[in-house]
Image: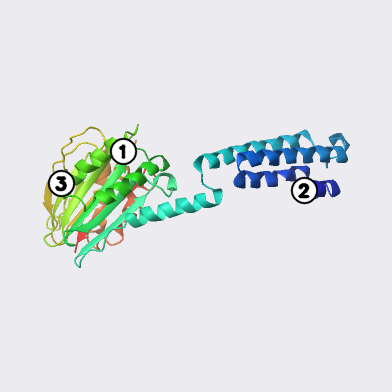
Amino acid sequence: VPAIAAATVAEPAWCAPSALVLPIVAGGLLLRPASLLALYAAAATALIVESAILGPYADGVDRVTPGTILVVAAVGFFGLLIAQFRSRVGVPWRRGGTMLFDLRERIRVQSKLPQLPRGWHREMALRPAGGQSFSGDFVVAARTNGGRTLEVVLTDVSGKGMDAASRALLLSGAFGGLLGSLPPHAFLPAANGYLLRQDWDEGFATSIHLVLDLDSGDYELLSAGHLPALQLSAGTGRWEEMAAEGPLLGVYDGAQFDPIKGTLRPGDVLMLFTDGLVETAERDLTEGMDRLTGEADRYVACGFHGAAWHLIEAVAKDVNDDRALLLICRD
């Protein structure tokens, strides 16, 4: 601040009085609110000294004008708001972005699907609302029963984007710990109990749990208020809805989740997805699912490798909602 004040007095044409906003911006990012007030006092003193030495603003353009004072005061006000926010969060600004990046990468690693044996293909695409990095949709997966069984849980937390991201982050960690630690039929009741204990104002979620035997292709689907899965039968070339029964997670205790059974034969495909992919304000659920299966039919002949992301682009590119699509194919 003294250096800028001295430069302004010496060369006001090159160093304007409004240059004091530079240390104020830096202070808002670096200092605590108490230290920031001392900085503001120093800046105010510098303005007074500059005004006294340079003379009244009516004498020329290189003076301390009322506009200069308003600009410095406004920047100082917003700097104080930023400093108070950082103080409440307890994270330095230099580390805040790093922490968010680390959290995003941990979510991405946790959502990574395990490798499958030869003859199977799996892929997932996730696109958050508004092009953000965090989503209310997430996937947890694990191979259990000595690697013979693939368990995948696709969950859609109420809300979207950053509004649901913090709850999705907490639930993904909890669900990842439960998956494989409990028998398959006990997972959704345990997840429901965990969600109820959080006592969130907007705490419900939908979830679908796939339990797939990688040797035989037999599977079970358990649903907690989630959309049905879609299965392509290679023999008929038709898509069939696989709808299991079960209430939303986090609504009431003692909920029952009834499984539905099926089999993936060679050439069959199973799609799991969230409502953002098929349902919008302008398009109902049935129309959205018909559009999804119509686009998916384009990949029947050439295979579904790399199809998940392209299907989201084709069906719900500009939808302002979280979208997730999971494909399990038996070659």
| Dot 1 and dot 2 residues touching (CB under 8 Å) | no
Image location of residue 216, percent across then percent down? 11, 60
**Closer to us: mark 1 or mark 2?**
2
| Dot 1 and dot 3 residues touching (CB under 8 Å) | no
Query: Of marks 2 and 3, which one's residue comes earlier in the chain?
Result: 2
Q: Amino acid at mark 1?
A: Arg
Residue 67 appears in the figure = yes
Image location of residue 213, percent across then percent down? 14, 58
> Residue 185, labelled with which disc?
3
Foreground: 45 or 57? 45
C-alpha distance separating marks 1 and 2:
59 Å
Determine the residue positioned at 19% across, 50% down: 182
Outermost residue on the front side: it is 34
Instruction: Give the side of residue 328 with respect to residue 169, left or right.
Output: left
Query: Of marks 1 and 3, which one's residue comes earlier in the chain?
Result: 3
* Secondary structure beneath label 2: helix
Name the residue tied to disc 1: 283
Q: Amino acid at mark 2?
A: Ile
C-alpha distance separating marks 2 and 3:
69 Å
Quarter of the figure with the C terminus: bottom left
146 to 192, vertically: above or below: below
Residue 286 appears in the figure = no
Query: Of marks 1 and 2, which one's residue comes earlier in the chain?
Result: 2
Determine the residue positioned at 85% across, 49% down: 10
Name the residue tied to disc 2: 4
* Secondary structure beneath label 1: loop
138 to 52, vertically: above or below: below
> Residue 81, labelled with which disc?
none
